[in-house]
Image (tube, grey):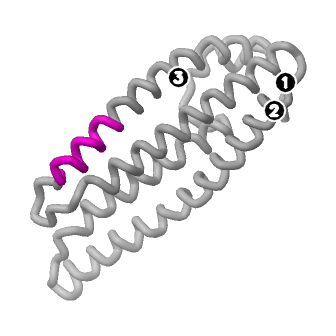
Amino acid sequence: MPKFVISYVKYVDYISTKVGRIAMYTIFLMIAVLLLGAITRNILNMPLSWTVEMAQFIITGYYIMGGAYSMQLREHVRMDLLYDNWSETTKAKVDVCTNFFLLFYLITLFIGSISSTMYAIEYGQRNFSQWNPSMIPIKIIMVIGIFIMILQTISMFFKDLAKAKGTPIS
């Protein structure tokens, strides 16, 4: 593989790892928010209207920002009915082909997320709830997370292509 491809793979994998590991810890933030909501509602008898919705936003950021790291570790959901029985080279060849479908899907999501974020910014979109939070931050997180997943998909394509040719990139 050319040197720029190897550099790209290493750089994108580094970014995916760092973002994914930071995202891993947001689960504790979500637990803290839900615990606060439970304590204020059940013990202090002062229910907070924003805790469940904030937990939903946090978990959305958690899985969107952790998506690329999950892909990098190959820990995402996969139909293993046939795949598990194949050799590593065959798996790599199949993954090279399926990466195009994933890339098409992610690019479509990315275009939609940009459009949705621009709408949220232009019209000051807020969620229709008692708390009424701005949707802009979660939409920006969505755009960033999907973009990182696109970069990681391209990295996975190069790694699978190299593995299929018999010269894997570490």
- The residue located at (69%, 20%) in the rendering is 84
Mark 3 or 1, closer to the camera: 1
Residue 96 falls left or right of residue 128: right
User: Would you place residue 6 above or below residue 161 in this image?
Assistant: below
Judging from the image, what secondary structure is the residue with disc 1 in?
loop
Using the rendered view, name the quadrant where residue 96 is placed.
top right
Foreground pick, 160 / 46: 160
Q: SS at mark 3?
A: helix
Q: Residue 139's x, y, as percent? A: 33, 48
Tell me residue 58's x, y (percent): 38, 59
Q: Is residue 118 magenta?
A: yes
Q: Position of residue 121 (x, y in %)?
A: 24, 50
**Neighbourhood count class around disc 3 (C-alpha, 10 Å): few under 14, some 14–19, many 20 upward:** some
* Tags 1 and 2 touching, CB below 8 Å: yes
Disc 2 designates what residue?
6
Q: The N terminus appears in which quarter of the rendering?
A: top right
Range of magenta residues: 114-125
Please tell me whether mark 2 or mark 3 is closer to you in this view: 2
Q: Which residue is mark 3?
A: 103
Q: Earlier in the sequence, mark 2 or mark 3?
A: 2
Question: What is the crowding at mark 1: few (fewer than 14 residues within 10 Å), some, or many (at least 20)?
Answer: few
What residue does disc 1 label? 2
- Vertical comparison of 19 with 87: above or below: below
- Above-or-below relation of 9 to 142: above
Residue depicted at x 50% and y 38%: 147
User: Identity of the amino acid at label 3?
Assistant: Leu
| Residue 145 falls within the magenta-colored stretch | no
